[in-house]
Image: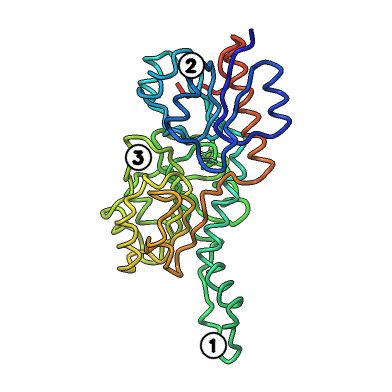
């Protein structure tokens, strides 16, 4: 008897074909996100769950007596209550490696877009407000090349960003991380420093930490006050690694120069959030890994994780 799995998100034909070789697959086909109650119904008899962003907690695990593995189609797994999963002996997996370069590209895009005011000036041109008589100093931005980049969270994506900074933009790279990264220091000349020094010395501050109890609101009022008022704050990690109200105040009070945001406290971001009205803030809808090639690779990796566990070979990417 093939193990039963449930998928809460759309899956490509080749991944469906691959999964169906090993599992009996059921999937959510609704337009919106599946409701919690319907999901709990579906989980009554499944061995594996293929998902992204769905909260995996005691309540869900209590309603999934046969569940053996939850496979996230994401590298982040802050949706997992890992202690509860250990208690219920449910393996949790994620999709590292396959998205590193794609997220690093988006990180640099946000640095360049915010520093050179791409979104703001794109709107100006499209609104027909490019007035040749005006002094083009009004269009001036800030150089990215040869400036100082501060990376908070030097994991695989952090190293991919450091490589671009060092070899593509001749930037000085500072980093703050739980542990030292000698490889990044050697390869990219990355200088390890404490958080406060990084905040004081960086022209671009990039958040790349996973969201954990230690990193929740890691950047708040005190930290923004340490930053230069010429600095740009870039967040491609999770919205909750930053105190969003403190970020809004820091921008309103010109304590920092601008920001580039891929993630928010609440997603989708609310229509009345001041951040989306600020011309010096570039906002995108959590697209860090959003290329077809990378999302397909993430989906296949997540499918391989679920099959590997359910065929007794253990997880490729276990989160604990
Ligand atoms: C995911 C991400 O696409 O991998 C992650 O941690 O944030 C993105 O790549 C996102 O989690 C999907 O909800």
183 and 208: which one is in front? 208
Task: Determine which residue is flagged by label 1.
Answer: 135
Among numbered discs 1 and 2, the one appearing first in the sequence: 2
Among numbered discs 3 and 2, the one appearing first in the sequence: 2
Element marked by disc 3: loop
State the mark number for residue 67: 2
- Residue at (56, 73) in percent of width and height: 123
Distance in Å between CA atoms under marks 3 and 1? 44 Å
**Image: 20 above or below 154:** above
State the mark number for residue 88: none
Neighbours of disc 3 within 10 Å: few (<14), some (14-19), many (20+): some
136 and 124: which one is in front? 124
**Which residue lies most toward the bottom here?**
133
Residue 222: image quadrant is bottom left
Look at discs 1 and 2 and give the one toward the viewer.
2
Give the percent coordinates (x, y) of residue 251. Answer: 35, 65
- Residue at (73, 30) in percent of width and height: 14
Task: Determine which residue is flagged by label 3.
Answer: 215
Neighbours of disc 1 within 10 Å: few (<14), some (14-19), many (20+): few
**Image: 244 above or below 80:** below
Distance in Å between CA atoms under marks 1 and 2? 64 Å
Q: Are marks 1 and 2 in contact (CB under 8 Å)?
A: no
303 and 208: which one is in front? 303
**Image: 8 above or below 66:** below
Quadrant of the image containing the C terminus: top left
300 and 32: which one is in front? 32
């Amino acid at each position: 008897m093939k193990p039963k799995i449930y998928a809460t998100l759309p899956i490509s034909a080749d991944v469906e074909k691959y999964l169906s070789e090993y599992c009996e697959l059921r999937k959510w086909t609704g337009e919106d996100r599946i409701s919690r109650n319907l999901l709990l119904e579906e989980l009554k008899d499944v061995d594996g769950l293929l998902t992204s962003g769905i909260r995996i907690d005691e309540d869900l695990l209590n309603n999934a007596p046969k569940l053996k593995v939850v496979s996230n189609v994401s590298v982040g797994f802050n949706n997992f209550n890992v202690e509860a999963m250990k208690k219920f002996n449910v393996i949790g997996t994620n999709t590292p490696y396959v998205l590193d370069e794609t997220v690093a590209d988006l990180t640099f895009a946000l640095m360049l877009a915010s520093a050179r005011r791409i979104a703001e000036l794109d709107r100006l041109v499209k609104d027909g407000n490019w007035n040749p008589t005006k002094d083009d100093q009004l269009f001036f931005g800030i150089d990215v090349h040869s400036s100082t980049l501060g990376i908070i969270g030097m994991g695989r994506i952090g190293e991919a960003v450091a490589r671009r900074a060092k070899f593509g933009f001749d930037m000085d790279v500072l980093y703050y991380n739980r542990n030292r990264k000698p490889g990044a220091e050697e390869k990219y000349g990355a200088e390890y420093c404490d958080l406060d020094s990084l905040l004081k010395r960086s022209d671009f501050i990039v958040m790349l930490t996973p969201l954990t109890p230690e990193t929740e609101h890691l950047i708040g009022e005190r930290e923004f006050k340490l930053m230069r008022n010429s600095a740009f704050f870039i967040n491609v990690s999770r919205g909750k690694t930053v105190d969003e109200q403190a970020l809004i105040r820091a921008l309103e009070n010109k304590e920092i120069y601008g920001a580039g945001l891929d993630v928010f406290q609440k997603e989708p971001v609310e229509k009345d959030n001041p951040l989306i009205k600020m011309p010096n803030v570039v906002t995108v809808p959590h697209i860090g890994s959003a290329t077809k090639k990378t999302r397909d690779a993430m989906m296949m990796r997540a499918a391989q994780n679920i099959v590997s566990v359910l065929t007794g070979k253990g997880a490729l990417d276990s989160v604990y």
